[in-house]
Amino acid sequence: MADLPALSPDQHAAWSAVADTLAQAGVGLEDGQLAPAIPDRAPTVLAITGKAGSGKTMLLATLTRNLRSAGVEIVSPDWEGRRKKERRTLAILAPTNKAASVLRAKGVPATTIHRILYTPVYDPEFEKVAEWLTGQGDRPTVGTLTDIQLDRTKDAYGQHGSVPAALAAAGLRGSDFITGWKRREEPLDLGFIDESSMLDERQFDDLKEIFPTLVLFGDPAQLPPVQGQGGGMVFDRLPKDRVKSLTRVHRQEADSPILDLAHALADPALDFETFEDMVQEAARRDPRVHVTGRVDSDLMARSPVLVWRNATRIKLIHAFRAAYGAPETELLPGEPLICDGIELPLKHRKKRLDLEARGLIKGAQVIYLGPGKKPGFSRLHVIGAEEPQVSAASIVKIEKEGEEEPFIPFAAQMGATFLHGAAVTIHKAQGSQWDVVQVFAPDIFVAARVGRIEAGQPLWKRLAYVAITRAARELRWVVANRLARPKEPLGIEDLKQAPITLALAAEE
């Protein structure tokens, strides 16, 4: 029998639905029996939906733990051994690096959807080391590694379970053992997808091609993936019997005022003014909620202000840069950026795959560390990535108020493109979480006055719900368009890596 925590009736129904779905795929969640995968089976999709605090992550983590106990292997995006006919595997995925890192912080070995679409190609000599580390081969003789280095890789693999991290412990860089990246050609097995409210139809189709069995976990109260089109989420179009809803709020052990505010937004009669009164009242009785007349510029360096309108975002970014005395023609180390895609021609597909596999996908949150070794290159820290240190050709765009063309402080001819990240739209913040979150309330007020409906709900309520549930510990409700002066200069000391962490450089 599976190792179950105490489950509410709705969680138990969801668990049973997952168990039935897995049993049809030959995986016995209840008895631990595993049968070989059924080849060419039509994709089966089940969705578990619920608002913040309903227990989705707890359910996902418990399912993962029980599947591992039954002998299901977790797929690593950094190394895949020889395929065995009888092997059953599970991949836990999220749409963004930040969303995946939130799961990893809770003990769930997650990676990004994009990262699982591509697999690394290892140098044959180091492929033998990887096979040995993962128990698929004998201890190799590698001319470039001493016995002491091999022992060090074995110890590191035992601690971290990561082949790249183990090779990094021997003093290697990614470019020493990874020769390139290729699109995954063969399907995987079981897939758990968190933050599935963020999926668009193309991503969903890609996942169904790769995974014959998919379980989606998502929040129906979030914003649709394409803003302004009212398209809803991918699980909205599943048959009703393939969607199990979690309705009870469980995450109340700490009597969270943030969750109380989030769930109050479900009241159809609630208007913006009444909601803001509730925020004020929560702030009076609980230090985890603050109402403030100024944006905290120190906090913006690592936790962006969440806004609705692009004009607000641009104005706050320029105020942030001015507060830190950032020169117009260059970036300061420690400035936050948002990846806006990769501008490379088709003939550079290999380089594009390399950058994307290292975390530079659209929407990735990045901290600028300084210039790279080559003109136009930047050293970057990708927030939430498992190996966050990257150096890449960069095109940085800083938008100006009232102007169509952005200001570009510096740029390579081609490469990864970035916007400034001191403020981001609430829509782009989905899937992310920060300890402390600043929400720019005047924008929510404007959305309420506009009276727009999105996916069947007042837009301002969806915006407020998504924004405040990004806060893991503390919510700051900013009521005025003012910026507090920074108390400390920008820096990057907080981003220093432990020695075991692998640093990859795309410019080499």
Image: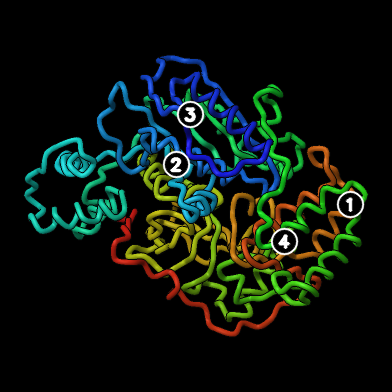
First in residue order: circle 2 vs circle 4: 2
Residues at discs 3 and 1 in contact (Cβ within 8 Å): no
Q: Is label 2 in a helix, a strand or a loop? A: helix
Whichever of callouts 3 and 4 sits on the residue coming sooner in the sequence is 3
Q: Residue 450 carries which label?
A: 1
Q: Which of marks 3 and 1 is in front?
A: 3
Closer to the camera in the image, 456 or 355: 456
Label 3: how many residues lie within 10 Å, few (<14), some (14-19) or many (20+)? some
**Mark nearer the N terminus (4 vs 1):** 4
Label pair 3/4, CB-CB below 8 angstroms: no
| Image point (49%, 72%), residue name | 334
Spatial CA span between label 3 and label 4: 36 Å
The quarter of the picture where residue 306 lies is bottom right
Check residue 65 in the rendering and tell me which mark sits there, or answer none.
2
Q: Nearer the viewer, mark 4 or mark 1?
A: 4
Which residue lies at the image location 19% right of the left edge and 58% below the top edge?
170
Q: Which amino acid does label 2 sit on?
A: Arg
